[in-house]
Amino acid sequence: MQVAEQLKQCLLEGEVSQAVQEPETRLVEEEPPNVPSEEPVSPAPPEDPATCSVETIDDENLTRKLQGMLVLAGADPGPLDGIPGAMTTNALISVLGETAAQLPTEDAIAALRELMCSDSDR
């Protein structure tokens, strides 16, 4: 008898006259775990080794682009919301120094790109 039928019996009659037959369970043989090969696996090469990580940030909102670059530089600009708040300014100062607080956004982006994408870092 199906479970639904038993439930109906229980609700209407107060008891179940026939027990539910348990479905037959079958043991599924497990596949052997993946055994690592003896050969070392090398990481995939970057798409373009000459591309700096900050150049991959493509955002029309310059403040949000700046905030993303600050994250890549290891700073915390707060939420990547495109709003130049105190956290963004403090992160910019922590990476570029006190004078960075006065930079227009485009100049700050250029300074970060220069700092992070110099030939010595590639």
Image (cartoon, rainbow, N blue to C red):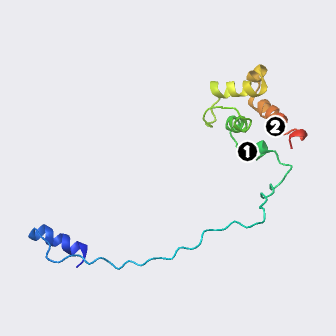
Tell me the element at label 1.
loop
Residue 91 point in image, percent of width and height:
69, 28
Residue 105, picture quadrant: top right
Query: Residue 116: which disc?
Result: 2
- Which residue corresponds to the image point at 69% horizontal and 32% vertical from the top-left? 75
Residue 34 point in image, percent of width and height:
64, 68
Residue 52, picture quadrant: top right
Residue behind mark 1? 57
Q: Amino acid at mark 1?
A: Ile
**Residue farthest along the left direction in this orientation:** 13
- Which residue corresponds to the image point at 26% horizontal and 78% vertical from the top-left? 21
Residue closest to the eye, 41 or 99:
41
| Whether residue 24 is situated above or below residue 60 in the rendered picture | below
| Whether residue 64 is situated above or below residue 40 in the rendered picture | above
Can residue 100 be seen?
yes
**How busy is the neighbourhood of tag 1: few (under 14 within 10 Å), some, or many (20 plus)?**
some
Q: Amino acid at mark 2?
A: Met
**37 on left or right of 52:** left
Mark found first going from the N terminus, 1 or 2: 1
For the residues marked 1 and 2, what is the alpha-carbon distance in whole angstroms? 13 Å
Can residue 85 be seen?
no
